[in-house]
Amino acid sequence: MPGLRGVEVRVRDGGDLMPGDAASTATPVVIVGSGLAGYAVAREFRKLDKETPLVVLSRDHGGFYSKPMLSNALAGQKTAASLLMKSADKMAAELGATVLAGVSLQDLDTAARQLTLAAGERLAYRDLVLALGADPIRLPLAGDAGDAVLSVNDLDDYARFAGALEGARSVAILGAGLIGCEFANDLLHRGIAPTVLDVADRPLSRLLPAEASAWLRARLEAAGATFRLGVAASRVDRADGGGLTLALSDGGRLHADQVLSAVGLRPRVEVAQAAGIGVGRGITTDRLLATSAAHVYAVGDCAEVVGMNLPYVMPLMQQSRALAATLCGRPTPVSYPAMPVLVKTPACPTVVCPPPPGSNGDWQVTSNVAGCEARFVGADGKLLGFALLGTATSMKQTLAAEVPAWVAD
């Protein structure tokens, strides 16, 4: 079979796929997605169960790499090849699994517990884990250069972006959120001047209080970044003499050698939705990561767990450990302890532990030349979240110990 990696797969009469190892008489656990979430579940599952057949489906090369590293790889002069930690073959051997690379789903039949791949092969599952990830949100930009706007969401995207930077001296970044600020900092290490645009009036507006945002902005600007806030790009055109020109909502124009879109991610829910599985912002699950369909689970960026879609590493790891136990017959609800997020902006070291959604309270901010400490304090005086910048990041462990869990038994 083209695209096959790892343990042999046999095709039975009628096009059914079955793992070809010694345990192939059992129906496999199937994980759709080979990103950080998919492989985290696979690894945690294998720690507890060495025998049950395991199949990982990947729409790309199936190799393992850390997606969070993509937004600070330029500083380390990393190539896409050097970011790939293990090939699909190595992952298959390590996990005792079948890794099918370069495949996509055509149909999911939850009643029959069966997947149909785009090439027509069918694969039965005992349990199915959807680790589908998320897609970059694409702004509806007018102009003749919409196809030139780049985004970085996987290793292939990073390879294209890094290649496009050859000879570039300026990059316009659409979005002043977490990823936009991280890429701005990273581009500075390549001697490339980033200009960050956002409709919000400050960077990291969803994570930081105003005073902390201003502190971050000042440090990134001192390092060489430029912010144009309260504006949106309306069109992008190829400029005479090379590069791109952005038309802005305030009537201004901005020229840049490249444009990077970092306005957010949209969970991939189409496969689940087509199969009649409940979706909201993401694929909705309970604390067992179970979807509305029996024997179907969701984890990672595509999942909306008890109303929360958290596209960060720590929630993903909590989900993976809990789900692995559940798949091994020990139903384990996921718990979310305090989960600080490291913002990869070395020009302004930043750690954020957001308060739980819907929390009532106020930000209390103190700052000096060296650091900024912001505490989100509830009406009862308890610490519910924090943001630490500069030298204040040294307080991360101390404050994290005081913050209550987001989801606990």
Image (cartoon, rainbow, N blue to C red):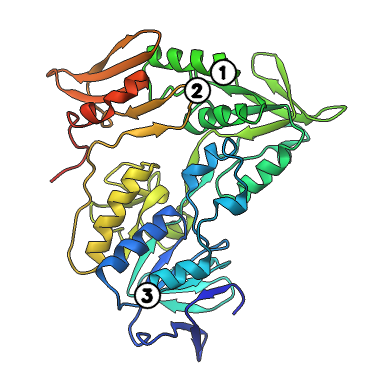
The front one of 103 and 313 is: 313
Residue drawn at 36 percent across, 34 percent down: 341
1 vs 3, front mark: 1
For the residue labelled by badge 2, is the local secondary structure a helix, a strand or a loop?
loop
User: Which badge, 2 or 3, comes first in the chain's sequence?
Assistant: 3
Please, is residue 381 above or below residue 295 in the view? above
- Quarter holding residue 38: bottom left
For the residue labelled by badge 1, is the local secondary structure a helix, a strand or a loop?
helix
For the residue labelled by badge 3, is the local secondary structure a helix, a strand or a loop?
loop
Q: Residue 310, position in %: x, y?
A: 36, 41
Q: Can residue 294 be seen by looking at this rendering? A: no
User: Which badge, 1 or 3, comes first in the chain's sequence?
Assistant: 3
Instruction: Identify the residue at the far bottom of this view.
Output: 13
Q: Residue 385, position in %: x, y?
A: 26, 26
For mark 1, does the 10 Å Cα neighbourhood hold few (<14), some (14 to 19), or many (20 or more) residues? some
Instruction: Identify the residue at the far top of this view.
Output: 368
Task: Give the alpha-carbon distance from disc 1 to disc 3, as whole Å.
Answer: 52 Å
* Image disc number at residue 223: 1
Under mark 1, the amino acid is Ala
Which residue in the protein does label 3 denote?
125
Task: Give the alpha-carbon distance from disc 2 to disc 3, as whole Å.
Answer: 48 Å
Disc 2, disc 1: CB below 8 Å?
yes
* Image disc number at residue 347: 2
Q: Can residue 398 be seen by looking at this rendering? A: yes
Under mark 2, the amino acid is Ala
Task: Give the alpha-carbon distance from disc 2 to disc 1, as whole Å.
Answer: 7 Å
Please, is residue 82 above or below residue 201 in the view? below
Residue drawn at 38 percent across, 85 percent down: 24
Please, is residue 94 above or below residue 73 in the view? below
The front one of 19 and 236 is: 19
